[in-house]
Image (cartoon, grey):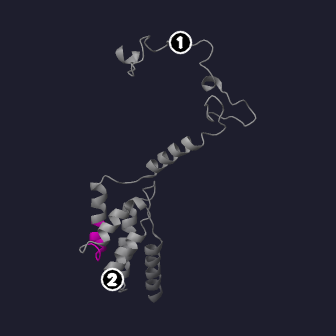
Amino acid sequence: GEDARNAAIAIARRDISSATWERNLKNWSFDDYCLRHTRANNTLAKYGVPVDGPSQVRAFLDGILNHQMDGIKSNVMFNEETKSDLGKAIIRFKDTMSALNFTPTARHQQNDNRNIGSVSRGGRFQGRGGHQGRGHKRPHESHRGGRGGRGRGRFKPQGRGRSEQPDDGLKLDKNVLD
């Protein structure tokens, strides 16, 4: 009855206002974000709740939190055809993303963070030899692990795996030649 209608409207409004997207994650993609907005607006339309097109598009664009998408958001918002139609806005947004070959994912973000972090502070329990927290070391144990501490080790021949010619920037792997 009336309670179910009011509950569905409240859920739809909450979905529109709370849905956000910054990048594709394992369980939340841009398609999921678009689908949530579309379903919620369809629910509101089904129950006769008036929501104009520009408000739908504005709520959709406001939930996109990735600042690298600001240009695409402007493109959608200032286009006469898409600024008042959520369906067309979603299609234009997706088309522009694919044309620019831009779909940020958690893996890209993780790699970016890892690169930045490794430059700025090194790894866990960083020792002098650059052996950065590999394995299960405790803080009170020696930081110079077996093969990665200082020096080359005791019995490693100098030219192992390399040609003895001067280094001209090109490296040959003997396994490839065999």
The kind of residue on which mark 1 rests is Gln
Question: Which quadrant would the C terminus be assigned to in this image?
Answer: top left
The disc at residue 158 is: 1
- At x 43%, y 82%, the residue is 9
Residue 72 image position (x, y, % from top left): 33, 63
How many numbered discs sit on the rendered protein? 2
**Residue on which disc 2 sits:** 52
As rendered, which of 174 and 41 lies closer to the eye?
174
Residue 37 image position (x, y, % from top left): 38, 71
Residue 114 image position (x, y, % from top left): 52, 44
Q: Which residues are magenta?
A: 82-91
The kind of residue on which mark 2 rests is Asp
Per the model, the C-alpha gap separating discs 2 and 1 is: 74 Å
Question: Which quadrant would the N terminus be assigned to in this image?
Answer: bottom left
- At x 42%, y 52%, the residue is 105
From the image, state whether disc 2 or disc 1 is nearer to you.
1
Image position of 172 with respect to 36: above or below? above
Image position of 153 with respect to 84: above or below? above
**Crowdedness of circle 2 by 10 Å Cα count: few (<14), some, many (20+)?**
few
- At x 64%, y 40%, the residue is 124
Quarter occupied by residue 94: bottom left
123 in the magenta segment: no
Question: Sequence order check: which comes first, mark 2 or mark 1?
Answer: 2
Quarter occupied by residue 150: top right
